[in-house]
Image (cartoon, rainbow, N blue to C red):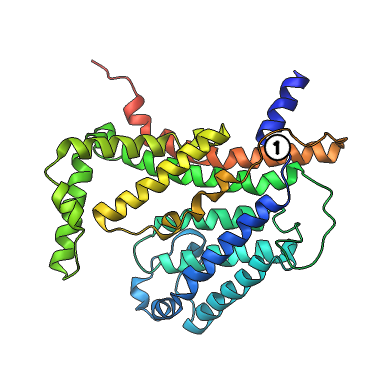
C-alpha cells in the first residue's frame, strides 16, 4: 500500500523544476497585460454605465449597487500594476495572491454589466493557481535571486492547479450542453448548425460581416453532427488530460484546433484559447527519470496531501452541479 501511495504521489505531483511554473507565470502575465491594457477605455465606459444595468456575478455579488466609477477605475489600474509585478516575479508571496484577487474582481466586475464572458474563466483560475503557488523561485524568470535546491513537488502544484481548473471549465461547458433542453441530442449537430445560422443572420442585420465559411457549410448536416459530437466529447473528457502527459498534449491540441475552427466557422474569438496560453500548463510537467528522493518530513507529507486535495477539488467542485443537472435524466422511468 505504501509503495502504491508513493507511486500515486509521484504521478500526481512529480519532481518539477522551478522554471516550469515560472514560465507559465510570465506567459500568463504577458497575455493578461495585453488583454487588459487594450480594454482600459472600454472598462472605463462600463464603469460609467447606467446603474440599472448592473447585475453582479461571482465575487461582485457582495455589492448591491455599483462602485463609484473612480474607485472602479482605481481597481482596474491596481490590477494592471499588480500584473506587472507578478509577471516580473517581485515579492511573489504577497503580490501573487493580491494580483489573483484583483484580476478575479476586475473581470467579474466587467461581466456584471453585460453578458458573462465565460472565456475569461480559464484565465482567472490559472492566475489564481499561479499566484498562490510557488511560481517565482527560478532567478532566470524572476527578479531577485533565490536559493533553489532543485526539482520539487512544490513546483508541480501551480502547474497541476492550472491544468485542473482549465479541465473543470471545459467539463462544465460540456455538462451545460447535456443538461440543456436537448440533452444528449445536442450531439446531433442541429443545435450547433442553428446557432451558427442565427449568429450569421444577427451579424448581417447589424451590419457586421458574417463568417462566410459557416454560411457555405450550413447545408452539410453530417459535418455539423461530427463537429458537435467531437466538441462535446472533448469537453466531457477534459479531466482525462490530467491522467497522462501525452493525453494532455493530445487534448490541448484538439481544444486549440476546436477554437480556431470556431473562429473560422462562426467568427467568434476566444482570445486566451486562440493564443495557446490557456493550454501551456499541459506542457509544463517534466518527463523522464524523477529527481532523487529526499527525506520527507511530516509537514512535507501534509503539504503534498493538501496539494493533491486542492488539485482534485478543482475538478470535483463541479460534480455537485453535474449531479443536480443530470439527476432527472438518471432517474429510472416509472411505468
> What residue sits 78% from the left and 38% below the top?
302
**Residue 234 percent across, percent down from the top left:** 39, 37
| Few, some or many residues within 10 Å of mark 1 (<14, 14–19, 20+) | many
Q: Quadrant of residue 228?
A: top left
Q: Is residue 114 left or right of residue 23?
A: left
Report the number of discs. Answer: 1
Q: Is residue 330 left or right of residue 302?
A: left
Asked whether residue 63 appears in the rendered view, the answer is no
Q: Residue at x 14, y 59 (%)?
A: 201
Residue under the image location 56 percent in, 54 percent down: 126
State the quadrant of the N terminus.
Answer: top right
**Image height check: is 265 above or below 108?**
above
x and y percentages locating residue 255 in the rendered image = 41, 44
Outermost residue to the bottom: 70
Where is residue 81? Give x, y as percent. 61, 75
Describe residue 89's horizontal placement relative to residue 29 as left or right: right
Which image quarter: residue 200? bottom left
User: Quick one: SS at disc 1?
Assistant: loop
Find disc 1 in the rendering and name its residue: 14
Residue displayed at 19% across by 52% down? 214
Residue 209 at what x, y percent from top left? 19, 66
Q: Is residue 33 left or right of residue 91?
A: left
Classify 128 as above or below 81.
above
Amino acid at each position: 500500500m505504501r509503495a502504491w501511495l508513493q507511486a500515486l504521489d509521484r504521478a500526481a505531483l512529480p519532481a518539477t523544476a522551478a522554471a516550469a511554473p515560472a514560465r507559465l507565470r510570465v506567459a500568463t502575465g504577458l497575455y493578461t497585460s495585453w488583454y487588459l491594457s487594450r480594454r482600459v477605455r472600454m472598462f472605463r465606459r462600463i464603469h460609467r454605465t447606467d446603474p440599472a444595468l448592473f447585475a453582479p456575478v461571482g465575487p461582485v455579488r457582495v455589492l448591491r449597487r455599483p462602485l463609484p466609477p473612480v474607485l472602479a477605475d482605481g481597481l482596474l489600474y491596481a490590477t494592471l500594476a499588480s500584473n506587472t509585478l507578478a509577471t516580473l516575479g517581485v515579492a511573489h508571496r504577497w503580490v501573487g495572491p493580491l494580483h489573483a484577487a484583483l484580476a478575479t474582481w476586475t473581470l467579474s466586475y466587467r461581466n456584471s454589466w453585460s453578458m458573462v464572458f465565460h472565456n475569461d474563466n480559464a484565465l482567472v483560475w490559472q492566475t489564481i493557481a499561479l499566484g498562490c503557488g510557488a511560481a517565482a523561485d527560478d532567478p532566470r524568470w524572476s527578479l531577485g535571486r533565490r536559493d533553489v535546491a532543485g526539482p520539487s513537488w512544490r513546483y508541480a502544484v501551480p502547474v497541476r492547479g492550472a491544468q485542473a481548473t482549465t479541465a473543470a471549465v471545459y467539463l462544465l461547458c460540456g455538462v451545460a450542453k447535456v443538461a440543456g433542453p436537448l440533452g444528449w441530442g445536442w450531439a446531433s449537430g442541429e443545435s450547433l448548425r442553428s446557432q451558427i445560422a442565427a449568429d450569421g443572420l444577427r451579424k448581417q442585420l447589424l451590419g457586421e460581416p458574417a463568417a462566410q465559411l459557416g454560411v457555405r457549410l450550413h447545408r452539410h448536416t453530417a459535418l455539423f453532427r461530427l463537429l458537435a459530437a467531437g466538441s462535446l466529447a472533448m469537453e466531457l473528457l477534459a479531466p482525462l488530460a490530467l491522467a497522462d502527459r501525452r493525453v494532455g498534449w493530445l487534448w490541448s491540441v484538439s481544444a486549440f484546433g476546436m477554437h480556431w475552427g470556431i473562429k473560422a466557422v462562426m467568427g467568434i474569438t476566444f482570445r486566451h484559447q486562440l493564443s495557446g496560453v490557456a493550454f501551456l500548463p499541459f506542457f509544463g510537467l517534466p518527463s523522464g527519470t524523477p529527481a532523487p528522493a529526499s527525506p520527507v518530513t511530516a509537514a512535507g507529507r501534509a503539504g503534498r496531501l493538501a496539494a493533491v486535495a486542492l488539485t482534485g477539488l478543482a475538478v470535483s467542485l463541479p460534480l455537485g452541479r453535474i449531479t443536480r443537472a443530470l439527476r432527472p435524466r438518471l432517474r429510472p422511468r416509472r411505468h
